[in-house]
Image: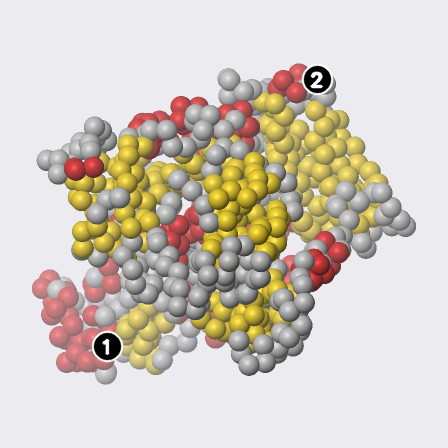
Amino acid sequence: MRWTLAVALLAAAVPLWAEEQDPPAVSPAGDSYQRWLDDVQPLISPREREVFLALTEDYRREAFINEFWRVRDPFPETSRNELRERWEGRLEEARQKYDGEGDERARMYAVFGPPLSVIPGRCSGILEPLEIWYYRGSGRLRGDFWLVFQQRGSRYILWSPSGGLREIAVGLTGSALADGGLLRQVADQCFRGPEVATALAGAADYERLRSSGQLFPDPGFEWVQTVLSRSTDIPSEGEAFEAEFSVQFPGRYQSRTVLQGVIVVPPDNIGPSDTARYPSYDLVVDGEILRKDALFERFRYKFHFPQQDVAGEIPLLFQRYLRPGVYELVVRAQDLGSGRFFRHRQSLEVPFVASAARAETRPAPVDVASAIPDRAAEANASLSDGDWSVRLLPPPIGLQVGNTRVEAITAGEGIARVRFALNDRPVMTKSRPPYSVEINLGEGPRIHRVAAIALDAEGRELARDEIEINAGPHRFAIRLIEPQRGKTYESSLRALAEVEIPEGDRLDRVELFLNDTPVATLFQPPFAHPILLPPKSEVAYVRAVAYLSDGNSAEDLIFVNAPEHLDEIEVRYVELFTTVLDRRGRPVGGLTKDNFKVFEEGDEQPVRRFERVVDLPIYAGILLDNSSSMVEELDEATKAALKFFETVLTPKDRAAVMTFNHVSELVVRFTNNPEVLAGGVAGIVAEGGTALYDSLIYALYYFSGIQGKRAIILLSDGDDQASEYRFDDALDYARRSGVSIYTIGLGLPSGNVQIRSKLQRLADETGGRSFFVERASGLGKVYAAIEEELRTQYLLTYQAPEGDDKRFRRISVEVDQPGAEAKTLRGYYP
């Protein structure tokens, strides 16, 4: 490993500032690691140092060192670690220039780099011998500053201005030691006196700069807590439980051997988790694989077993994929119910397995080409002579940003080219198949509409198709493939519809209409049916309506053989779920339509629909911070979340659980089953950093496509540290989503204005509410307030004004109740 060599070389070097360190509480194995601690002394925090000293094995020390530099990498998107390279280079230069032990010029050289100039401080009878370094900014510091060193024999020590000039003055007493008078003497009597006096007046206080975090970025302590949380050691106060462990190599995956480990746990040796209504066994398995005395990989598995389903011993099975060779395996199982541990360590000789037949537990590779229906053949089968069709293939699953490939398939003779458009703006035209283009969706998450238009040689439109990208997994929509806009039909047509069903829902039926006359009700695909058309002189439209089993519906409508002058006007209604709070922050009920006024961009809008929200289903998601900093509060936070679900959910409602640290995880999909929610909450473990903005965007994407009252409850104890997206991206996506966000800041100091302001703004802009609590034990009252608010809302609907302006439109709602305030979303994008 690179750092093994680097540390070994440093072992023979002179320590640059070792004398500043307190004796270690635990002596690391080998002088090389103590030397590393000495070399990074200006960078490492006391808590990081304490954790490093407590490590007991070299492979963990090496892993710590690598992670120490990784979290400080100023440009992680590059292959280099610029800070590490600069630091190591300066260390080497400092040793060559200042080889005396304890010479603090070496330390400052490593921290600030070479000075712009060096001023000798020779002022006999007034000052001790000095050496002054001048910088015009360095690293994160801006502006001019000086470092002043006092000579002590053959070495130099750094002077701190906090101690005053008397520390470097000689031969002076009484009033002559006053700083102002001394500086005047220096300026008048010393060699290069004005420069020396200026330097003394503007000298940097290194310790103050370091303690305030101005010299180096603070990576926080979460990464260290993550290292600790993934340990395979049993804590000194931890109790062990007995279990059996076995390992086998059942097959092969590609060029690797399948390693299968099993920990068999008797249920009598552990205890169920503390969820009285839904007891379960919850265990976490952490593992480390070593190769050549170095950490090769880490892994973690979480297991959840409802107590009622456990009839005998509990198997905890894990798999890894390793190349043949010699390894060492360390595994630790933690029972979350009893807090006890099982640990096992053994050597492994991973064999070469000749055949992977039947041994692979991963699914066989999918033939993507065969998995996609032959849409061209399908379309041609339903076409008569002179007809054309264009179909866009479904977009990739997940949130798409940047360059995304879009592909269209055509059918019918006479199609000369296909034009692609993004949000009604042409982006590219392809004149021959394959009709595939890359479209730039931008760096921010958005819902986009992509169209493919088939054209003839003269540029006339023959057919078109549209899809939405980033519509989310819960999009419920029906799309009429036939009839198509712009096509001419004679006496009949074959109506064909395609339905997108939300994840976890079931389609009940599809109804087809000619104008307002029912034509057919279809209960399974293909959703196709012939329709006889009226005489050409009559304007007609085909309408398709899809219904889910819970009664929700979606529809699409196409005019058939419409005259060219017929304009289709899209009527957009804006729904405002509105909460009214009194002066004490309590919801106000019993209001009527006449109590409200709605304004868009300052203009009053007539309320078309008004109702008290009582029976509408609620879709609620808890987005829970489970980063390492939550380790002390996570247990209380999960119990409060479970209590919220038990209190709020009715048979009509749905809830989901999402967690986030440096990555997002959908723990429980939308469900109204409290037992499933309890099981998901029980297995949550604190680990990793905090990617708040990425995770909020992921949660909003998961909510996309759901209609009605939607709310995300975001619980976090800190600022974002690991997101690719910015706060502005998350706020903009939240505005476009229509989802109310309730933010809960846990344990945030009142002085942390920036984080509090961001959480407040997310709530205010989306019609939610922000809360700040000191400890997780106070979450019960917060969840009760959110529940009361969600059940005491009003739905105000108005028709959006016409216009092609796509900018954000501001909304405000006024209520004529003294001391009351109406809270709803601040605006929308048309």
x, y (%) of residue 572? 34, 53
**Looking at the picture, does residue 670 appear above or below residue 138?**
above
- Indicate the quadrant containing the C terminus: top left, top right, bottom left or bottom right: bottom left
Cβ atoms at labels 2 and 1 below 8 Å apart: no
Left or right? Give the position of 136 relative to 483.
left
Q: Amino acid at mark 1?
A: Val
x, y (%) of residue 76? 51, 63
> Viewer-proximal residue, 313 or 309?
309
Distance between mark 2 and mark 1 Cα atoms: 83 Å
Please give the residue where the numbered disc 2 appears in the rendered image. 311
Please give the residue where the numbered disc 1 appears in the rendered image. 196
Q: Is residue 343 visible?
A: yes
Left or right? Give the position of 457 relative to 382.
left
**Looking at the picture, does residue 812 appear above or below residue 535?**
above
x, y (%) of residue 724? 47, 58
> Viewer-proximal residue, 142 or 648?
648
- Indicate the quadrant containing the N terminus: top left, top right, bottom left or bottom right: bottom right
Q: Secondary structure at mark 1?
A: helix
Indicate how the structure is coloured in the image: secondary structure
Residue at horizontal 27%, vertical 47%? 798
Residue at horizontal 66%, vertical 20%? 309
Residue 784 location, quadrant: top left
Q: Secondary structure at mark 2?
A: loop
Q: Amino acid at mark 2?
A: Ala
Q: Residue furthest right?
A: 354
**Looking at the picture, does residue 85 appear above or below residue 313?**
below
x, y (%) of residue 258? 79, 45
Q: Nearer the viewer, mark 2 or mark 1?
A: 2
